[in-house]
Every structure is written in C-alpha cells, then in structure tokens.
Amino acid sequence: MFINAIECLEWDSRFFGYSVAKIVLDAQGYYLIEDLFRQIVTEKIRLTYLFVPISQTRLNILISDKGSILVDQKTVFSKKTEKHIRFSNDIIEYQETEINDRLINLVLQAGLFSRFRLDINFSDKEYEKLYIEWLTKSINKTLAIKTFVVKNGSEIIGITTLGERSKFADIGLVAVDKNFRGRGIAYDLIHSADNTACGLGYDEIKVVTQLQNKGACRLYEKCNFQIESITNVYHYWQ
C-alpha cells in the first residue's frame, strides 16, 4: 500500500473498463493534494478512490472542496478469537462451487450500503457485477477459505465467508434474507466464523462494514467486536 501516492488499480480498471486508482492519505497528505490532483488530471484517471483518516478534518475539507464525493465511512471491527458453543440455528459449511440466483439475490441484499451502489456515477451495474464476482471468488475459495450458510428447508437464507490474512482472519460477506432477520442467524454465522478462525490458530478476527450501516455495526458489537478504525472514503471522477 502506497501512502500519499497514486496507486493504479489494474484489477479494478480491467473489471470496470476504465482507469481506476487509489490514494491512501495520512496527515502529510494535506501538503501533497495539489500535486496529486494534477497527476490525476494529467494521467486521465477516470475514477480515484481516496482513503482519508476521519480525524484529519482539514484534509477531509480539502478533499471535498476538490469535488470528491464522500461515499463511505469504512469501519473496521476487530476482536480476539474465541470459541462459542450455543447456537440457535444450524450452521452448514457450503461445499458447492457454483453460484445460483438465490445466492446472488442474497448477497446483493448485503451490499445496500456499498459505495459502489450509493455512488450514482456508476451507470453500468458495477455494484451488481462486483458483488457477484466477490461471491464467485469466495465460493471457489479464491477469496475465502470457508463459506457458512443457514437454510430454511432447501433454501439458503443466510451466508458468511471467512478469509485469512498473514496475521488475522477476516469475515467477508455477511447476508441474511430480509424475510428471516431477527432470528439470530447473522449472530450464529459470525460465531461460526469466529470458531473456525480460533481453531485455525488465529488470535484476531476482523470485519469491515460501513458506519452508516447501523444494523451491521450493532451486530458486530453484539458479537464482542470493537471499532478499530474509521476511514472516510471518497470517489473523485473525471
């Protein structure tokens, strides 16, 4: 990850069909913004993601004044892994490698607060394409090591995925069908992921959501996660 420098995102650019870059800024970024934006214009970058610490007030104001759109307050939750024994729902490890319309519909429900959905400048179903890709790569274990589901009969009504980094485990997709919420399904899915991470020897597990997604934030707090960081995420379009 580059700090205070433009990082061209090859995967995003190929996937969306136009040039995409990322800038991660710290306090020193305030003094480099003019040069960075000139570079964005010179290199004709169509979309730039800017990640700015929420604590850097002057920097956030400057980014906004440049025409960037605040599309997310990325919130990282973390906790020490632990074992859980009480479950209200039957959790199943999903073993199939193919996705279907039911899984797609379920996962798209999870992305209602996604910046790729909320930013109206996306006009080619980028949000849907991105979440379907995320689901596909999770199921085939490219992005996840485990996928857990809850079923009502033969119908999947809840899903979560577990990935691993070098020093911690991370929860990716979390979705429960809107008709089955309030039954502790998401709570049990998170605990299943926590159990697996603990069993694999990880001391820490993390999950990322949007600060405005109050339901998700309440869920993670109920599962003993605490906020580790909040980052403002902007989109700058040319």
Image (cartoon, rainbow, N blue to C red):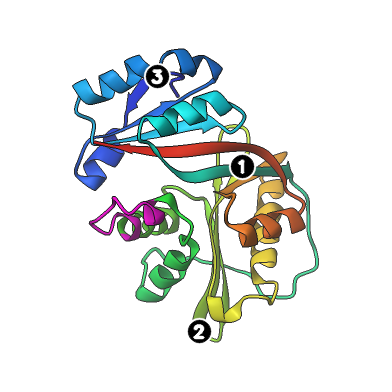
Q: Which mark is residue 172?
A: none
Q: Amino acid at mark 3?
A: Ile
Compared to residue 2, the image places residue 53 above or below, namely: below
Give, as a single range, the part of the protein colored magenta: 116-128
Q: Is residue 126 magenta?
A: yes
Rounded to the nearest whole Å, what is the CA distance between mark 1 and mark 2?
33 Å
Quadrant of the rendered image containing residue 23: top left
Q: Residue at x 78, y 59 (%)?
A: 84
Circle 2 — which element?
A: loop
Q: Which residue corresponds to the image point at 51% horizontal and 14% vertical from the top-left?
A: 28
Cβ–Cβ below 8 Å for labels 1 and 3?
A: no
Residue 123 x, y percent position in the rendering: 24, 56
Of pointers 1 and 3, the one earlier in the residue sequence: 3
Identify the residue position indicated by label 2 in the image.
154
Which percent across, then down, holds residue 140? 40, 56
Pick the residue in front: 137 or 65. Answer: 65
When asked about the image quadrant of residue 107, the answer is bottom left
- The answer to whether one can see residue 125 in this image is yes
| Residue 223 visible in the picture | no
* Residue 22 point in image, percent of width and height: 37, 30
Q: Nearer the viewer, mark 1 or mark 3?
A: 3
Q: Earlier in the sequence, mark 1 or mark 2?
A: 1
Using the rendered view, name the quadrant where residue 20 is placed.
Answer: top left
The residue to which callout 3 is attached is 33
Residue to which mark 1 is pinned:
76
Callout 1, which amino acid? Val
Spatial CA span between label 2 and label 3: 53 Å
In-front residue for pair 65/142? 65
The one nearer the camera, 82 or 27, is 27
| Label 3 secondary element | helix
Q: Residues within 10 Å of mark 3 (few under 14, many from 20)?
A: some
| SS class, disc 1 | strand
